[in-house]
Amino acid sequence: MRVLVLGATGFIGFHVTQELLRNGFQVRILRRKGSPVHHLQSLTIEQILGDLNDLSSLISAMDGCEVVFHCAGYYPIYSLARRKQVAIATQQIHNVCEAARQTNVRRLIYTSSPSTIGQSQEGKLANEQIPYSLNRNRSTYCHIKYVMEQKVLEAAQNGVPAIIINPTGVFGPYDIKPTTGRIILELLQRRMLVFVNGKLNAVDVRDVARAEVLALKKGRVGERYIIGNWNTTLRDFLEIAAHIGSVPKPKLAIPFPLAYLTAQISEILAKYVFHSPKPLLPIAGLDLLRYGTHVDISKAKAELDWYPSPISIAIKDTIDWFRKNGYLAR
């Protein structure tokens, strides 16, 4: 069976591509010109150039594929141009769903975000039935992810056979940018002098990839599946990561108001003064902690027959990969 992966050059998409190959699928990827591909060189895949903003390139890429794995969701690095960012995200997800409709794909597996899962009451776990928390709309990142997921759910109600995966905080090797692994990298580099504490759930990226393939085989159209593992706090996560990496843990937690003020200044300086591709402290990262929640993964276990591996393996492999690939010297 031939499948298309959108976002194969990214963290989750790369591991989904590997998992598909291990399961005997023929894999085609759509990537932008200039995307990093050195980590894909050893994979037997078909590569096509295109863009999520270009509907015709998506239709061409999906032609002849039975399944599409969408792991290239729009991620706003800055939170300074909300209206424009929402418009980009909306157009991209519309194009993906429309291309899937026109090419009659058998399944569209969409990688969403934990931020679209509602916050549970204290002492309880959030599941797929808890509605989106509207107070999160103050966050550009959360609002965009919610809008995109709603578009996919609407498409599923109108004939596009879409299934949604909601991975939590994802860790593991080959986090090239890095993305969520950035907090581990900064810990290893001893740059994390302070932190902001909040709830989070951590999961191995390879477990997420397995869940995506299982969703194709066993998932129900129009359903969401939370893919997570360790319900914890950033404080406890950093303590474990510091122990595994044999580095000091940060001891000073700063309050959210001070962190947000710092992040706003950081984004303005990075974008308009230093013209940096990313701010030192992104508001989106704070939003994920501020609106974090602990989750229930029983639906994925029951319906997908999916079970996560120990999170310590993901943390250790993340640390080993950063060290082996020279990230600590950057």
Image (cartoon, rainbow, N blue to C red):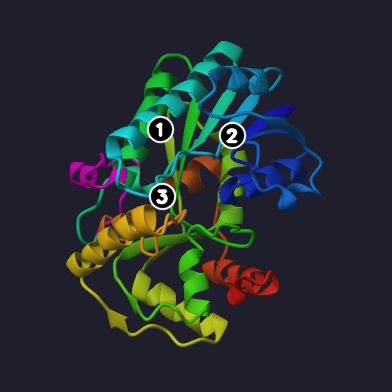
Compare marks 2 and 3 and give the one earlier in the sequence. 2
Compare marks 1 and 3 and give the one earlier in the sequence. 3
Compare marks 1 and 2 and give the one earlier in the sequence. 2
* x and y, in percent, of residue 73 in the image: 48, 38
Q: Which residue is mark 1?
A: 89
Between circles 1 and 3, the one closer to the viewer is 3
- Residue under the point 62% across and 40% down: 213
* x and y, in percent, of residue 239 in the image: 42, 80
Any mark on residue 69, and which? Answer: 2
The type of residue carrying mark 2 is Phe
Q: Are marks 2 and 3 in contact (CB under 8 Å)?
A: no
Where, quadrant-wise, is the N terminus in this rendering?
Answer: top right
Placement of 108 over or under 112, stated as above or below: above
Magenta: main secondary structure: loop
Q: Which residues are magenta?
A: 124-140
Placement of 302 over or under 256, stated as above or below: above
Q: Which residue is mark 3?
A: 77
Please say whether residue 294 is visible from this viewpoint. Answer: no
Q: Residues within 10 Å of mark 3 (few under 14, many from 20)?
A: some
Between residues 300 and 173, which one lies in front from this camera angle?
A: 173
